[in-house]
Image (cartoon, grey):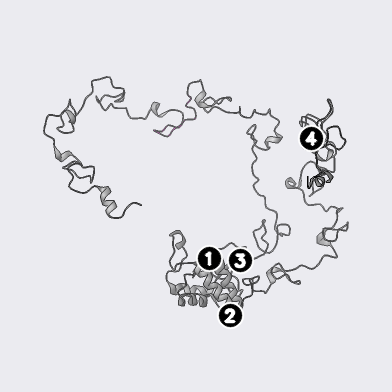
């Protein structure tokens, strides 16, 4: 058969199945009785570095039972943390909990800049000069950069191409493309202002509006106009209407188009200052490590154990017996575990119940001492409801106001002055005698509904 010799002469693939008795059989092959199967994950490289036994219940450092790794007095194995504080060098606490003054320590690592041992990256003699994160040039930082940040990184287009891109973006009502085209036009004509751009948009009857809103920005941000001047007063928002579309958005909106044009003289787009803010003194210009003020004490987040509900440790470090998952249901009635309130066999407790009548704790509303006596609507007596009344049912006719029969059983002429129409809620006739059209038909005539 044609092509048969090609198949027979083809070399066997590397991943082909091997007989179970061959030496290069894969880890999924059958093993002789009593032999340990290797599924490819039993090597030392895949053994957990935390477990020290089959039950994984001992210390992660020395493998002994009865204590956790944090309480282990043996040296840290496999290059782990020695337990020494990085701030003062003492044992028994970490840097986050250290109250001692900082102690200078000998640096024994390698420099992250040149890779040589003996000094830190901040002290590296071959460290290149700092570069500006805005323009990428050396010799100054981003806070001192004189480049126009608002148009830096914007594609360089001719004025005509930028204007055509603005027309197309306005037609599509794409805010991102409108802003890109606007900044590209400002890059082509560096002296153009936001007020002049708004006047052009209005003269061409475009849908885009440049609205100067009074809006606060964070101290790590600044408002930059088209010429790159920072700390402007108003924030420019690209809208498709001269009036605010929502009441919430109306705050800070200009009241008239003339006021908007006047605001655009001092308006711009919010941008990051790219200046550090200290988390210790909340001042700009430096980080917390270089803060000259005294270190503030911050409130630490309280940690609550999900096992014993005590504060100060997590469930993984809890020494109390572990609760069985799925069986740790606590009854809100008796406080015992293993069942919930609807399964509780004990009488309902009012210990943690708030009365719906007086708002006090410790009793139900039906047992409230300040509750008004219950009056039966059938017989007028106190102490029971109409549904529990054992007296003869008392009925009052809605037609003649007589007692002992209902309006359906009344032998008097029907008093139409008491009848209310369910169509227009007028008295004097029923819905069948209503001279007005039904409400549904009127709604359809007015175009209501879908």
Element type at mark 1: loop
How far is disc 1 from disc 2 in space, using C-alphas? 25 Å
Residue at image mark 2 = 191
Binning the other alpha carbons within 10 Å of mark 1 as few (below 14), some (14 to 19) or many (20 upward) gives few
Residue 153 image point, x, y percent:
65, 70
**Mark 3: few/some/many CA within 10 Å (<14, 14-19, 20+):** some
Q: Residues within 10 Å of mark 4 (few under 14, many from 20)?
A: few
Vertical placement of 120 versus 55: above or below? below
**Lower position in the chain sequence, tag 1 or tag 2:** 1
Q: Earlier in the sequence, mark 4 or mark 1?
A: 4
| In-image side of 58 versus 249 (left or right) | right
Please, what is the dominant secondary structure of the magenta stretch?
loop
C-alpha span from label 4 to label 1: 57 Å
Q: Is residue 277 above or below residue 402?
A: below
Residue 322, quarter of picture:
top right
Residue 358 highlighted magenta (yes or no): yes
Q: Are marks 4 and 2 in contact (CB under 8 Å)?
A: no
Residue 28 badge: 4
| Callout 1–callout 2 Cβ contact below 8 Å | no
Q: Where does the image place residue 260, in percent across and percent down from the top left?
A: 47, 72
Q: Is residue 224 visible?
A: no
What label sits on residue 386 in the rendered view? none
Q: Residues within 10 Å of mark 2 (few under 14, many from 20)?
A: few
Which-is-in-front pick, marks 4 and 3? 4
Q: Which residue is mark 1?
A: 174
Task: Please report whichever mark, 3 or 1, sits nearer to the chain's N-terminal start.
Answer: 1
């Amino acid at each position: 058969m044609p092509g048969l010799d090609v198949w027979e002469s083809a070399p066997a693939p590397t991943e082909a199945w091997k007989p179970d008795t061959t030496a290069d059989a894969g880890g999924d092959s059958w093993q002789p009785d009593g032999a340990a199967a290797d599924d490819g994950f039993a090597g030392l490289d895949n053994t957990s570095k935390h477990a020290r036994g089959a039950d994984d219940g001992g210390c992660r450092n020395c493998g002994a039972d009865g204590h956790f790794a944090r309480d282990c007095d043996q040296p840290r194995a496999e290059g782990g943390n020695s337990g020494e504080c990085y701030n003062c060098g003492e044992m028994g606490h970490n840097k986050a909990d250290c109250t001692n003054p900082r102690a200078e320590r000998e640096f024994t690592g390698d420099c992250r800049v040149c890779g040589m041992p003996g000094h830190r990256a901040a002290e590296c003699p071959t460290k290149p000069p700092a570069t500006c994160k805005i323009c990428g040039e050396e010799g100054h930082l981003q806070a001192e950069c004189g480049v126009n940040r608002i148009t830096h990184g914007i594609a360089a287009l001719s004025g005509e191409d930028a204007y055509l891109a603005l027309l197309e973006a306005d037609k599509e009502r794409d805010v991102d493309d409108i802003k890109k085209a606007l900044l590209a036009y400002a890059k082509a004509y560096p002296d153009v202002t936001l007020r002049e751009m708004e006047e052009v948009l209005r003269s061409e009857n475009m849908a885009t509006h440049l609205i100067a809103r009074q809006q606060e920005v964070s101290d790590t941000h600044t408002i930059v106009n088209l010429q790159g001047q920072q700390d402007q007063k108003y924030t420019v928002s690209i809208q498709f209407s001269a009036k605010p579309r929502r009441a919430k958005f109306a705050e800070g909106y200009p009241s008239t188009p003339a006021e908007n044009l006047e605001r655009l003289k001092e308006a711009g787009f919010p941008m990051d200052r790219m200046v550090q803010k200290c988390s210790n003194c909340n001042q700009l210009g430096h980080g917390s490590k270089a803060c000259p003020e005294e270190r503030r004490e911050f409130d630490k987040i309280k940690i609550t154990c999900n096992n014993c509900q005590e504060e100060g440790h997590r469930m993984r470090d809890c020494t109390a017996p572990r609760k069985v998952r799925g069986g740790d249901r606590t009854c809100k009635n008796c406080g015992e575990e293993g069942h919930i309130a609807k399964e509780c066999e004990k009488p309902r407790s009012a210990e943690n119940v708030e009365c719906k009548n007086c708002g006090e704790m410790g009793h139900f509303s039906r047992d409230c001492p300040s509750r008004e006596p219950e009056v039966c609507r059938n017989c007028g007596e106190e102490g029971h409801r109409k549904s529990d009344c054992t007296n003869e049912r008392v009925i009052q006719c809605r037609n003649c106001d007589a007692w002992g029969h209902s309006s359906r059983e009344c032998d008097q002429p029907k008093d139409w002055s008491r009848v209310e129409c369910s169509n227009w809620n007028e008295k004097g006739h029923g819905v069948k005698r209503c001279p007005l059209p039904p409400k549904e038909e009127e709604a359809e005539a007015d175009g209501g509904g879908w």
